[in-house]
Image (cartoon, helix red, strand yellow):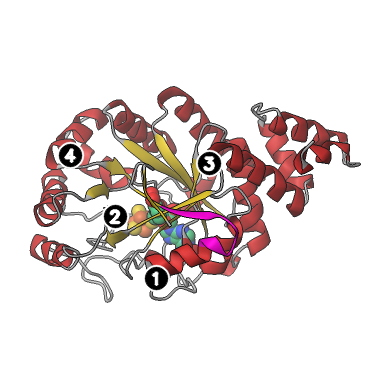
Amino acid sequence: MTFTENLLKIDLPSAIQKIIGKVLNGERIEPADALALFEQADLGLLGLLANEVNTRKNGNTVFFNQNFHIEPTNICVFNCTFCSYRRAQGQDGSWESNLREISHTCQKYKKMPVTEVHVTGGVHPKWDLDFYGQIISAIKHELPSIHVKAFSAVELDYIFKKANLTAREGIKQLIKYGLDSIPGGGAEIANKELREKICPDKSSWERWLEIHEAAHLEGLSSNATMLYGHIENYQHRIEHMEALRQLQDKTHGFNCFIPLKFKAANNTLSYIGEVNSIEVLKNFAVARIYLDNFRHLKAYWPMLGKQTAQLSLHFGVNDIDGTIDDSTKIYTMAGSDEQRPTMTVEEICELIRITGKKPTERDSVYNPIREY
Ligand code: V47
Ligand code: SF4
C-alpha cells in the first residue's frame, strides 16, 4: 500500500474521503468535489493528491523549453482593468514594432538554441490579418525552423472580424504564413458578469473557446490560461475549468493549462492586492486534479517568481515554461519580482533538480528534446 493510499485511512470529512477515493482510482471529479477541495482540503493533502496524479501522467519529468517572446505592440483598442501594460496610441510608454525591427530581434537568436518564439501583444487598431501574417513570415525568414506560437484569441478575433473571415478561415490563412500554435492568453475568467467588470469590451469567453476549437479543428494545438486572484471566487474558477475540460474532451487540442495569478501593480484593480503563495499552490493542485484530460500544467515563472514556481512542482505542475531571455514586459509592468526575466538552461535545470525532479527540455508540443 502506498503512502497516498494510506490517506484513505486518515480521519477526514467523508466528502474529502470520497474525493480521495475517486482521485486515487483515476475517476473524474465533479464541480462540487473541486469546491470541497478548494474550501476544505488542507494544502498538504492537495499536494499529495496532485503530485500523485501528475506522477501517474508524467513520472518525475519536469519540462522546460528554450524560448523568447516578441511583444509587437502594447497599443490596444481594449482597456482591461487588470492590465498594466496597455497604452493608447501616442500615449507615453506605448510602442509598436515594424517588420524590420521584428526581423532584427530574430537575428539575435540565430546562433542560439531556441526552439520557440511566443508572439503576443495589444490589439492594435490599425493592424490586420495580412500584417500579422507578415510578422510570422518575417520570423520564419530569419529563423526557419523555429516554432511560432502566436497571437491570443483576442488578437485573432479582432483581425478575423476585420477581414470578414470565420475563425476557421482566418486560422487557415495564418497557417499559410507559418503559424504553428496558439498561446493561451485572453481567456481571463469565463463568467460573464465578472468579464463585464474586468474586461468589458473585449471578445467574449464563447468566442475565445470558438477560436481555440477552430484552431484544433485546423490541426493546430493551443494553450489555455485562467486569470485568477482578483474578484472571482472558487465557483468561478471551477466554471472556467469545466468549460476547458469539455472542449478538451471534444478536440484534445490543448497542450497545457496555465493559471495566471493576478499581479496588482500599476493597474485599475491594484486596490485588490495579490493572493499569497498558498493560494497559488492550492490552485495548481485543484487544477491538476480537475483537468484530468490535460496532460501538462505550467507554472509561468516570470509571473510567479522562481521560488513559487519551484514549489509548484510538488503541487501538480510539470512544466515551467522557458528561458525567456528578458523578452517579455507584461508581468514586469504589473509588478513581478522578476524584473529582467531570464534563466539559463543550467539555472532552470538546477531549480528543477533541487526538488528531486528530472529536468527535460521539450519542444512546443511536448516532445522531449533532451534530458539533463
Ligand atoms: O491574457 C495581463 C494576463 C495574459 C495581467 O500560452 C495578467 O504559453 C496577471 O496568456 N496580472 C497574456 N496576469 C499572457 C499569456 C501567457 C503567458 C505565458 C505563457 C502563455 C502560453 C500565455 O496575461 C493575458 C492576461 O490573462 N495578464 N495582465 C496582470 N496584471
Ligand atoms: Fe489589451 Fe490584452 Fe491589456 Fe486587455 S489584457 S488591455 S486586450 S493588452
Residue 140 on the magenta segment: no
Amino acid type at image mark 4: Leu
Q: Which residue is mark 2?
A: 120
Place residue 276 in its image quadrant: bottom right
For marks 1 and 4 on the same chain, the one whose residue lies earlier in the sequence: 4
Mark on residue 174?
A: 4
Mark 4, Cα crowd under 10 Å, few <14 / some 14-19 / many 20+, is many
The secondary element bearing badge 4 is classed as helix
Q: Mark 1 or mark 3, which is nearer to you?
A: 3
Mark on residue 341?
A: 1
Q: Which residues are magenta?
A: 352-360
Q: Which residue is mark 3?
A: 58
Compared with 219, 317 (above or below) is below
Q: Mark 2 or mark 1, which is nearer to you?
A: 1
**Viewer-proximal residue among 154 and 184:** 184
For marks 3 and 2 on the same chain, the one whose residue lies earlier in the sequence: 3
Q: Mark 1 or mark 4, which is nearer to you?
A: 1
